[in-house]
Amino acid sequence: MNENIPAEVIAEVEDLRRRINRANYLYYVKDQPEISDAEYDRLMRRLLELEEKYPSLVTPDSPTQRVGAPPLDEFPVHEHIVPMLSLQNAFSEEELRAFDERCKRFLDMPLDSDIEYCCELKFDGLAVSLTYIDGVLVTGATRGDGYRGENVTENLRTIRTIPLNLHHTKDESKPDFKPIPRLVEVRGEVILRHDEFRRINEEREMSGEPTFANPRNAAAGSVRQLDSRVTARRRLTMYCYGIGACEGVEFETQYQILRTLDSWGFLVNPNIRKCQNIDEAVDFVREWQTKKEDLDYDIDGVVVKVNSIDLQNRLGYVARSPRWAVAYKYPAHQATTRVINIRVQVGRTGALTPVADLEPVEVGGVTVSRATLHNEDEIRRKDVRIGDTVVVQRAGDVIPEIVEVVKEKRTGQEKEFVMPSKCPVCGADVIRLPGEAIARCTGIACPAQLKERIVHFASREGMDIEHVGPALVDQLVEKGLVKDPADLYYLNVEDLASLERMGEKSARNVIDAIEKSKSAPLARLIYALGIRHVGERTAAALAERFGSIDALKNATEEELASVPDVGPVVAKSIATFFRQSETEEVLRKLKAAGIDPKSEKRRVSDVFADKTVVFTGGLSSMTREEAESIVFQLGGKPSSSVSRNTDLVVVGENPGSKLERARSLGVKVVTEDEFLAMLREAGVEV
Ligand code: IVH
């Protein structure tokens, strides 16, 4: 069937489909695109061009034959009543005018007549459909493949701009007033504003999760969250721009649809314009080319829709897109340049972010000489090396990023980036905990993190120092009065009185508050140190188990990991923190200032003092964690493996290989009853 088609064309079509399918999968299913939109559009256009030239090559499963990727399994499937189709694209003013001409030809209109258009922004988010029955939101769904999407109702319900009930917000006596239909599908785009995007990424950075590359991925990821509480925290918004199925209400124009949606309580973007002809639509497109930079959300183009619904019906659909609308896509601000160096920046939370220094290049009117590389994995995924030629992209006011490497330009001289093992700012160890994407500095006195660390140290859950909040800490650090948390205890009234808006009386109050905090219990001091992953609960467990900062400092990773709430990852984080010389110095200064709280719970007994105790098999009177905790409190060292240094092995039900090992090493073995008797002897009631 393909006799007349050159073999290289067949090969190219196959290659294009493979690349587009992969891009689709990463974009739609994984929310982790690997190629830029511009590159995707280029591939798609080439495939469309070849399929148009050689129609026998078109197969039902070609990516040109579908709108998106199939829905995931996790959410129930929702079938759209009226399919959610896609839009044909235009990339130049000529293509916009060609669209206008196509419409006129199809409608048998003279080419010099005018078609009225409704121009709207093309939001760069995630398309969704909301179904209302008798004015009540019953379902919210993603577009999916256009026919069947994912039912994400619970998630969409969390979006404040989506009305759960429809009611008229405008004067009902207006001539274009439309009643609320018995059933209606409302279409629109869920987006994330730039400030929210930045907030979410900051939070993710703090908790060690990988950051989102752009607001669209963040919005898509948030809508497709299985836990709607997570979605709620993302503060998404939705702009409505159309209607699918609608029972009992008719519209004359697209503009009227938008005004009606607004009157029913939906968020409709105010930047819409009725244009008398294609010239005015072109003006709108030109205007937004620059104005879009000032928006606090992303758009990637303008949608030009034939305004009259009657004309829309006559124009109909072709290949899953309406003939009556076109999406004008602004070229993504991209440029090619070279990576001069890859540096590491230390954020205020200690996160190490690799940043590429670039040969300065103009990207959409702005000179760019730096681009974020997010984290180590991202560098490996994109395989960016020092000396590489790269494509950089700038979208909205989001930091420029490297889209891809132009591998053909490699000379072999490029150097791979290695994450430093010491913090470039303070020299403390850098740690990347298992399962985390972000590498972090562990330095307690790291200048890059100092303000944050001191605010945390003084916070209510920490040392609870009244009056020492972000504003005062700012000044203390700027003036060089405080270089680590312990320095707070060496301040005097004169130091403080020299600060802005600080009289002698307030200075004295601050000093008193600092003095008072010296009696904070051990758990709060541990929390205040700001050890990664040590929250209030873990701090309390550590205080109970170790009883003093010195004991905690000297604990091995294994001992740490035996504390309830502390797994191997947290144990590693704690052990690394206490290994730092900066930590030692701060602890020394704290002790010298009189801060060395002891937890009173520990009652050392001779029976267990300094004895290494291992449990094997299940205990019937308590959990293993409880038993280990008691042993610890009695001065013993619970451990999870048997060695020559083990003093005692307690055997419960169904013991494991530890028992054999204990026997072969000649370690003392006791039963649970014998262990309980030892506890009683040590004064513990069991
Ligand atoms: S109208 C029949 N209007 O663009 C098509 N779509 O390819 C109806 N989009 O992901 C679409 N802003 O969610 C329309 N003002 C707007 C839009 C818009 C963004 C998205 C849409 C879909 C894609 C269409």
Image: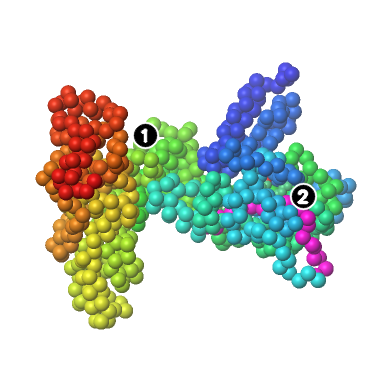
Left or right for 364, reference 468: right
Q: Residue at x 45, y 38 (%)?
A: 382
Residue 60 showing in the rendered view: yes
Residue, far left: 606
Camera-side residue of 356 and 671: 671
Splitting the image into 4 quarters, where does residue 621 fall? top left
Q: Is residue 279 magenta?
A: no
Q: Secondary structure at mark 1?
A: loop
Judging by the rendered image, the residue that carries numbered circle 1 is 413
The answer to whether 361 is drawn above or below residue 660 in the figure is below
Query: Residue 356 in the image: x percent, y percent?
Result: 40, 46
Q: Secondary structure at mark 2?
A: strand
Q: Identify which residue is drawn at 14% across, 26% down.
A: 666
Instruction: List the residue tagged with mark 2.
Output: 245
In front here: 350 or 621?
Answer: 621
Residue interval drawn in magenta: 174-194
Q: Are there few (<14), some (14-19), or many (20+) residues within 10 Å of tag 2? A: some
